[in-house]
Amino acid sequence: MAVEIERKFLIKNDNWKSSVRHSTHIRQGYLAPLSKSSVRVRIEGKSANLNIKSATLGIRRTEYEYDIPVDDAVEMLDELCQEPQINKTRHRVDIGSHTWEIDEFYDDNKGLLVAEIELQSEDELFEQPDWLGEEVTQDPRYYNVNLIKHPFKQW
């Protein structure tokens, strides 16, 4: 079984910006209403994927991801995915032996910044940079699938 172990945090200042290694625009949408899983189509830069993730909260979730042609992803996003969709820039910052992914959201989620780190185990230690704020891993509001239903601007 494919498993993702990920923790999410808010950002408390802009100190991360000087360490950005790479940034990519992401457009993503969801194909079906949430049940036991979410089915997402994502275009990230010049690549695309289909992602199936368990609809559970927490650090550990089942996840499957498959590359698909970008043209297919555009068609799925335009024709099959629910509205609204997620638009964000993902900034990658290396801290110690880990890469942080900082998502800067747009549209109805403008102003939201979330840092994510993928781990090998739930109890893995990692360096916590000075820009790292409150952990929101257990808060369902910060999951992308929920941001389309209840965007940040409505909080």
Image (cartoon, rainbow, N blue to C red):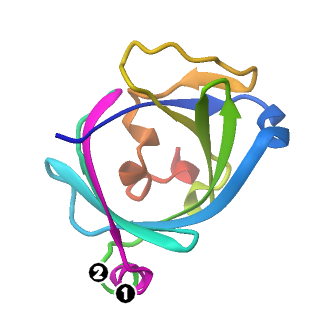
Give, as a single range, the part of the protein colored magenta. 59-76
Does the image show residue 85? no
Circle 2 SS class: loop
Percent of width and height locating residue 141: 42, 40
Seen from the viewer's position, the closer of residues 6 and 34 is 6
- Tell me the residue at 55%/64% (across/down): 26
Amino acid on which disc 2 is placed: Leu
Towards the viewer: 43 or 121: 121
Quadrant of the image occupied by residue 55: top left
Dot 2 or dot 1: first in sequence order is 1
Is residue 122 positioned above or below 113 on the image? above
As drawn, is 121 to the left or to the right of 134?
A: left
Image coordinates of residue 27 in percent, x first then y, are 51, 68
- Does residue 117 lie above or below 29 as drawn? above
Q: Position of residue 51 (x, y in %)?
A: 30, 58
**How far across and how far down the image is residue 31, in percent?**
26, 69
Do the residues under discs 2 and 1 have CB atoms within 8 angstroms? yes
**Looking at the image, residue 61 lies above or below residue 149:** above
Q: Secondary structure at mark 1?
A: helix
* Disc ID at residue 102: none
Residue at label 1?
75
Residue named by callout 2: 80
Above or below, 4 relative to 108: above
Q: Is residue 70 magenta?
A: yes
**Distance in Å between CA atoms under marks 2 and 1:** 8 Å
